Image: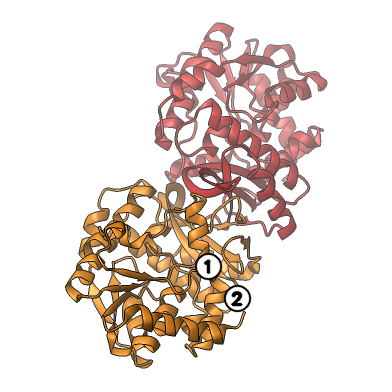
Chain colours: A red, B orange
Amino acid sequence: MDYQAFVEEQIARIREEAGDHLAINALSGGVDSSVVTVLAHRALGEQLKTVFVDNALMREGEPQRVVGIFHDMGIPVELIDARQEFLDALRGLTDPEEKRNAITNTFYATVFGRLVRQSGATCLLHGTILTDIEESVAGIKRQHNILSQLGIDTEKAYGYKVIEPLNELRKDGVRAVGKVLGMPQVLVERIPFPGPALATRIIGEVTTERLNTVRAATDIVEEELRDSDAFQYMAVLLEDRATGIRDGRREFGQIIVVRAIHSTDAREATPVEIPWPTLHRLCQRITAIPGVNRCLYDLTPKPPATIEYI
Amino acid sequence: MDYQAFVEEQIARIREEAGDHLAINALSGGVDSSVVTVLAHRALGEQLKTVFVDNALMREGEPQRVVGIFHDMGIPVELIDARQEFLDALRGLTDPEEKRNAITNTFYATVFGRLVRQSGATCLLHGTILTDIEESVAGIKRQHNILSQLGIDTEKAYGYKVIEPLNELRKDGVRAVGKVLGMPQVLVERIPFPGPALATRIIGEVTTERLNTVRAATDIVEEELRDSDAFQYMAVLLEDRATGIRDGRREFGQIIVVRAIHSTDAREATPVEIPWPTLHRLCQRITAIPGVNRCLYDLTPKPPATIEYI
């Protein structure tokens, strides 16, 4: 595929669709929404409003880091603090589908919906990729159907336009487009990170304390595996607990799973054969997190497992 | 240590303690109770009654296999089918301590208590080892305090004697005694297996269906790791579930953890560095068990984790 031509076509298409109106998009810091942000900024300049919603589910320092990277590229991004709204919506939920719905609804119907309506934008840009669409159709994941989730009935033609410039690409294609756009490697080579962020990495209830535990484990995994050739790596906090010994006494502790996979497009994945010294160090550092006394490594390819847990 | 002398001392001691009376012991098939059974049979011959209680929590074919091995050694063992009593006692329980108590109480107070009283024995032989006592004292595990668990008040001196011939040995010492006794290698080199058996390998409720799942996984792990130099290896069924894809559709499946450790005496343990081809094969076979779509490998040494999960 000629990605240079693809970029020029998409920029022309975005200009044509937006016309003289304001367009808006939400940046998550993942490669898909990052590439859409750069493409749309090239097309529209100040006619584009980009927001970054802090949902309390981000990695350590993530919101500030992402906004800073775009600032350095000359692209203004507005940071929206919606942490309390998300934590309130998640309180008491343990069912994965209910948690996912609470995050999706809080994002689209409440926070981003409010921002879209307040902005006066008539054009939305969205980082949907082909794999998302395929998995939605197969019933594996519920993916974004953005307008209906905003409470906007497209059929009645409210005049909103949705542009999904990447919806014919897979992850490797998105990365190639990012390179053509001259984006910094830290964004293009970014390991995938799910929309519901660290909430996807917590089985059971999402609380501030449990977020802190999985955030600390995520930090360790990303530091230890940054230089590996893995497609994606993550830490998952289980709800199950197991016995252990701490300072000679019984402790009923928490369990962290480390998952690292090879993949080209997230459709299939195989576990990375991490060297044993690294596995031992991961375990040692992760079981030093308060309350965590087990560390497991996920051996499962996709299929039969998905990459994420919930 | 001179294990030959140890064996002779213990045989003499058992004869002296038992006198002319009947002695009874329960064989689980683990190395501790197996060694006690052979020692006591050498000392007492037909004056010893040995029972094997099938608690429904055993590995595939285990009760028949163990009774058969002792039969071949000329030692009669009575097989007691108490499966329904244990399953009834476990129904609806998810708390690890409650499950452990239900199994212990069903074994001691109900099943073995009944057998002891019916037998007219006045002497009980028990395979307690030094590690059990140390972990009880440290509060890590509740171990057997056999007479009080039988509902027998030792202080009022009912005349029951408890003999624990192995209570100064650790696991390696017990194995050495087994070798001196000329026991078959399949018993002496037996990997440790906990008293509550497969129930210890199930987080959450113990049901016939979940026992079948962990039993199938245990079979696979034991077959794949039999020729490894591991001290112990096991499969654990978690209560948590995770998403997967089966035949192109979303599946919310079960998770099996494989644990394999090096240890000399179970006080400390380190994870075995299983070769990757074996790990991949374990995962492939385990995720072929109906309903299971993830396989994890436990990286944690003891401490901070214990060997078992509950």
Identify the subunit bearing mark 1: B
- The reply to whether discs 2 and 1 touch (Cβ–Cβ < 8 Å) is yes
Res. B83 visible in picture = no
* Residue A62: image location, x then y, percent: 69, 27
Q: Earlier in the sequence, mark 2 or mark 1?
A: 2
The residue nearer to you, when weighing A207 against A121, is: A207
Considering only vertical position in the picture, is B37 above or below A95? Answer: below
The answer to whether residue B225 is above or below residue B19 is: above
Mark 1 neighbour class, 10 Å CA radius: few under 14, some 14 to 19, many 20 or more? many
Residue A14: percent from left, percent from top? 66, 23
Measured as percent of width and height from the top left, residue A42 is found at 75, 22
For residue B228, the mark is: 2
Residue on which disc 1 sits: B233
Q: Amino acid at mark 1?
A: Tyr
Q: Quadrant of residue A256?
A: top right
Q: Residue, x 60% and y 83% (percent of image)?
A: B2
Seen from the viewer's position, the closer of residues A278 and A18 is: A278
Quadrant of res B127: bottom left
